[in-house]
Structures are given as C-alpha cells and as structure tokens.
Image (tube, rainbow, N blue to C red):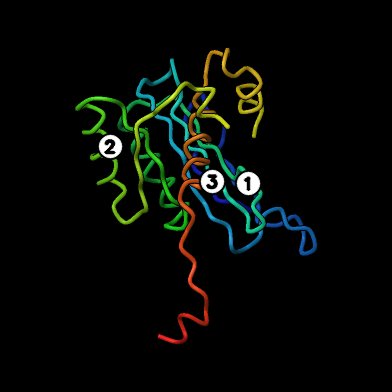
Amino acid sequence: MGLALPAAPGTARRRSLPSRRTARHRLVPDGGVEWARGRDLASFEGDGDYTVGAKLGRLPEGRFVIADIVRGRWGPDRRDAIIAGTASLDSTCARISLPQDPGQAGRTQELYLSRQLAGYRVASSPETGDKITRTDWNTALIAELRAFPYGTHDDQVDALSRAFSLLINQRPMRISDAALASV
C-alpha cells in the first residue's frame, strides 16, 4: 500500500504504486532504483496551469518507471507546502529538480524553494530549448501526452522531462564493496 496525501479540492487523489504485485511479480524492485522528482511550477489557484511533481525512477537494468504524479492548481503557499510534504514522503532517496525562470525573480524563487528543501538533494536549471526537444497515471497524464505539444496543458510533460534529464545526465558514483573494504 502506498502513502497518500489528502487531495486538494478539484484535484485527483495522490497515490503511489505498490513496490510489488505479489512476492513473485515485482512492479518496482525494492532496491537499486535511482529516483528523481521533476517539478513544473505554477502559482494560480483554481485555474490556469498546473503545478506538477513527477517521480521517475531508473531501474537497475536501465528501464524507466513513472512512480507518482502530484498535480494541482494551488496558490504559492499551498504549492510550497505540498512540495515540502512530497519531498518528505519521497525521503532523501529522490533527487529534486526545480525549474529556474529567467531573471531575478526566478533566481529568488529557486533560492527560497532550495532553502525550504534543506537536507534534500535539490538541483535547479533554467528551461532551455523548445518543449518538443525537452521531452525525449492516470487519465490526465495520458491525455496530456497524447495532446502534446498542441494541448492546453503541458505541465506533466515538463515535470517528467526534468526528472528524466536529471537521471540521464548525472549517473551516480558507484564504489565497489572491494574498494571500500580496502580503505
């Protein structure tokens, strides 16, 4: 059974995939998965773009799995509280990628959110390139993916793109047990 946050009015309930279907058929292995949560930020409650946090994992054999999507139209205070709460549920095992909008305001927002997420592995970067270039569970995600890039919303695509970029551009350093034993 996955962890759940209470749903905001007008949003889908947040669910996490179980780590295994049965003892014989695992959906996601218990260990060895590299996790990242990409973010796409919005700031208007009730209408407009969505704030999205997409949790993506790279399995040991190199396949990718979408483990969770947190999506809603929240004002800045609720959005920031949900970002912090989601980080707490993910624990420090998931790296977090935040977008940095251009200019001073974007830098200020990135610094504020990074400080709110102290103790977690946070990276930020400006959005670059067109949305098609940056994009290499639900009904809303599938509909958005099918409509991309011509649909009304692209927030989940942006968040998944950030998580994917974080996972493929920075391979974790691995130290063998033998090397550690010799120290």
Observer-nearest residue: 19 or 77?
Answer: 19
Residue 10 location (% of width, % of height): 51, 24
Q: Residue furthest bottom?
A: 182
The residue shown at (54%, 28%) is 157
Q: Residue furthest right?
A: 24
The residue shown at (51%, 47%) is 167
Q: How far separated are the C-alphas under marks 3 and 2?
A: 26 Å
Provide the residue designation for mark 3: 4
Q: Are marks 3 and 2 in contact (CB under 8 Å)?
A: no
Residue 4 location (% of width, % of height): 54, 46
SS for dot 1: strand
Provide the residue designation for mark 2: 110
**Residue 64 got which mark?**
1
Among numbered discs 2 and 1, the one appearing first in the sequence: 1
The residue shown at (37%, 33%) is 99
Residues packed near mark 3 inside 10 Å, few (<14), some (14 to 19) or many (20 plus):
few
Q: How far separated are the C-alphas under marks 2 and 1?
A: 27 Å
Q: Is residue 126 above or below residue 62?
A: above
Among numbered discs 3 and 2, the one appearing first in the sequence: 3
Residue type at mark 1 is Phe
Residue 94 location (% of width, % of height): 46, 52
Residue type at mark 2 is Glu
SS for dot 3: loop
**Residue 80 got which mark?**
none
SS for dot 2: helix
Q: Nearer the viewer, mark 2 or mark 1?
A: 1
Among numbered discs 1 and 3, the one appearing first in the sequence: 3
Q: In which quarter of the view is residue 150 placed? A: top right
Residue type at mark 3 is Ala
